[in-house]
Amino acid sequence: MNIKNIYTRQKQVRREQLHKRMGWENITQIVQGFVDRTVSARVACQWLGIARSRLYELRQKWQGSSAEERSKKGWITLHSKRSSRLDSEVQSFLEKELIYLKKQSPFFKEHFN
């Protein structure tokens, strides 16, 4: 295998992120056309340079966001509003359990990271 072929394949795999390759307005228009069914999925994927699964993720974000959120530049990269923190009760329970496992458990005492 030629080294040049390996390098060009790596370039194909590692492309810039969508919002860095295209302008926000273009992306918005293409996704809106796909949602309105004026642009087919195949054509939208070609224009955006993304896989079909990513196009459907964008459509889901588009449908789940308000018009105000879509007007912002970063609507594609908006994160969900769910928090990854646990309740304080659950957190304190887990801390107590870990302390027990580390220091008092007959099976894991001094053997648990």
Image (cartoon, helix red, strand yellow):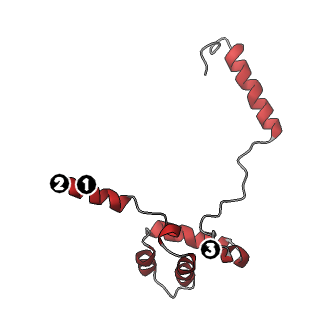
Identify the residue at horizontal 78%, vertical 36% (top origin). Answer: 90
Q: Secondary structure at mark 1?
A: helix
Instruction: Identify residue type, mark 1.
Output: Ile
Residue 25 point in image, percent of width and height: 57, 80
Which quadrant holds residue 70?
Answer: bottom right
Tell me if label 3 and label 1 are in contact, CB under 8 Å.
no
On screen, residue 61 versus residue 21, left or right, reads: right
On screen, residue 92 versus residue 59, left or right, reads: right
- Crowdedness near tag 2: few (<14), some (14–19) or many (≥20) residues, C-alpha within 10 Å: few
User: Which residue is more in the foreground, 81 or 8?
Assistant: 8
Residue 2's disc number: 2
Q: Which residue is mark 3?
A: 62
The answer to which of marks 3 and 1 sits earlier in the sequence is: 1
The answer to which of marks 3 and 2 sits earlier in the sequence is: 2
Identify the residue at horizontal 57%, vertical 85% (top origin). Answer: 36
Q: Which residue is mark 1?
A: 6
Mark 3 vs mark 1, CA separation in Å? 37 Å
Instruction: Identify residue type, mark 3.
Output: Trp
- Crowdedness near tag 1: few (<14), some (14–19) or many (≥20) residues, C-alpha within 10 Å: few
